[in-house]
Image: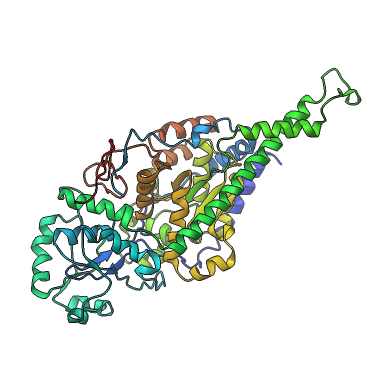
Amino acid sequence: MSLMNRLRSMKLKRQHSFEDEKDMEATAPSAAQRSRTAVGLFLGWAFVSWLGYDTGTGDAALATTAAFFGNARLLSGGENTTYADELWNSPDSQGWKPCVKPQVTNAVAVAKMLNATLVVPYFRDSGVWNDSSKFHDIYDIDHFIFSLKEYLPVVRDLPVDLDWSTPEYNDKCEKRPTCITYIPKHSNQEWYLENVLPVMQSYGLAATRKYHHKLTFDDLPLEVVKLRCFTNFIALRFVPSLRELSEKLVERIRAKAKLAALTKAIVDATTASRSSSVEPSQKPAQKKKGVSHHHKRRLLANKSASKMPNAGRFLGLHLRFEKDMISHSACYYDGGTAERKALSAYRRSLFQNRAEKAQFHSTYLRMNGSCPLSPEEAGLLLAGLGYDNSTIIYMAGESVYGGEARLKPLRDLFPLLETKESLAAEEELRPLKTHGLQLAALDFLVLQKSDVYMSTAAGNFPNVLTGHRTFFDFRKSIHPDKATLANLLTSNVTWSEFSKQVRESHSDRLGAATLRKPKYSVFRYPIPDCMCQNDNTLIPQ
């Protein structure tokens, strides 16, 4: 079948696959509903879940995208000459090192400002997550309290004289004088001293709700900044069971990556051996005597394998393409009228009027870089950067909108696609099956250890994860230039030009040392607040 016919067939299959999506149920929580609330003693606070996401949208030129996919698929089969060691190299740290060993950290920082005692976070139940996990189910509570004991008093429960303000009473928070239901985004120290401290002084307790992004990143006392860093990167640690399972998954995927690299070396050696086993002037029956072809192939394979510094490395891909994400973004993905109607109806029912981007046209959002990447677009971007079909990918995320039909283009480009379900035994995941927060934490840990990381959408999860990768290891983290990609996918450019422009536009988006700008998150950009360029250790005082 010709390439053109293959592309036409691909187009028909894609259009057909989305006619059945209109009745698909969401399996992941919305961005607006992912916050988790906790109550504090002398300081009420809400846990801003790093599992929340910001979203965006748009339409691609299907024929152009399909053509790119055809070229990328051919190149991924062994013709991709851009694949090189530098694809896996760590970005330039410029000498920045951790000086200390969000959300919860914001509460710790505010408690410090108010000279308050903090109660271990209380997570409100979420109808979206349907997860009853508590703080101690996700985070190592003993480590949390012990790490902070020199800097801030932390207690597990409210004292008897304040037990009337139990977490279970939190649903009636608005009716209590101790409850603060509104805190402006990125509030400064003065706001807390003027609004929270008087409540705490009057009642011995202050409680807050919906506490995400409620503390500024600028103009805070140095000791508060340092404690915030310490809490985010050191005091908050996942429970041992999650850490141990993540280590097993990382070990297993690296073993698969080594096997894939060796297999590729053997195939390459076999091809080279066959091409050189017969002299051009010789007939097949006149082969030279000497080392057997089998032995020669093994020698070539071993020689090739010994030169593979990338053996055992894997790429972490956080594929945020659930129905709630797509509907909130107001983006559409070539699913025709059925998709538009289904997503619009779903968005209205789930978000009411809270999806602000719905007021913009999907094409504008897409060309502006506000749309989450589809699996196909993510694959094209990675192929354009130079990763080939021998790349092992760990894919994190919930059920993909469109199911396997939507994933097929990505699998065709990168067949060595792994997930926690494919790497873990059924009995290992069984305790987590009904706990979406714990499953997300497991993904976080594996992605943190990946040699290269990329997320298809912006949000708290990739921000915090990228910050951890910068702080601990300076591992490569690709920040997709979605606007450039959208423009390229709707332009008549060759694959070579596409790949060239993709590499150029991402040369400064690979996780190199970047100073945090005003108003930007310290959890995403820990330099210079949490890191320094000398050997002095910055710890809370």
158 left or right, relative to 83: left
Q: Quadrant of residue 511?
A: top left
**Residue farthest toward the top in the current orientation of the protein:** 281
Examine the rendering and report whether any part of residue 270 can be seen: no
* In the image: residue 284, left or right of residue 393: right
Q: Is residue 61 above or below residue 75?
A: below
Horizontal relation, residue 478 to residue 253: left or right: left
Residue 190 in sight in this render: yes
Left or right position of 68 against 348: right
Give x and y (percent) for residue 211.
24, 63
263 versus 215 height, above or below:
above
Q: Nearer the viewer, residue 457 or 124?
A: 124
Where residue 324 appears, as percent x and y from the top left, is 42, 62
Q: How many marks?
A: 0
| Near-viewer residue (142 or 171) | 142
Residue 209 placement: quadrant: bottom left
The colour scheme used here is rainbow
Q: Nearer the viewer, residue 218 or 424?
A: 424
Splitting the image into 4 quarters, where does residue 157 fall?
bottom left
What x and y, as percent, mark residue 271?
Answer: 73, 32
Q: Quadrant of the N terminus?
A: top right
Residue in view at x 19 percent, y 75 percent: 174
Residue depicted at 46% across the width and 66% down the height:
26
Residue 531 position in % (x across, y down)? 28, 42
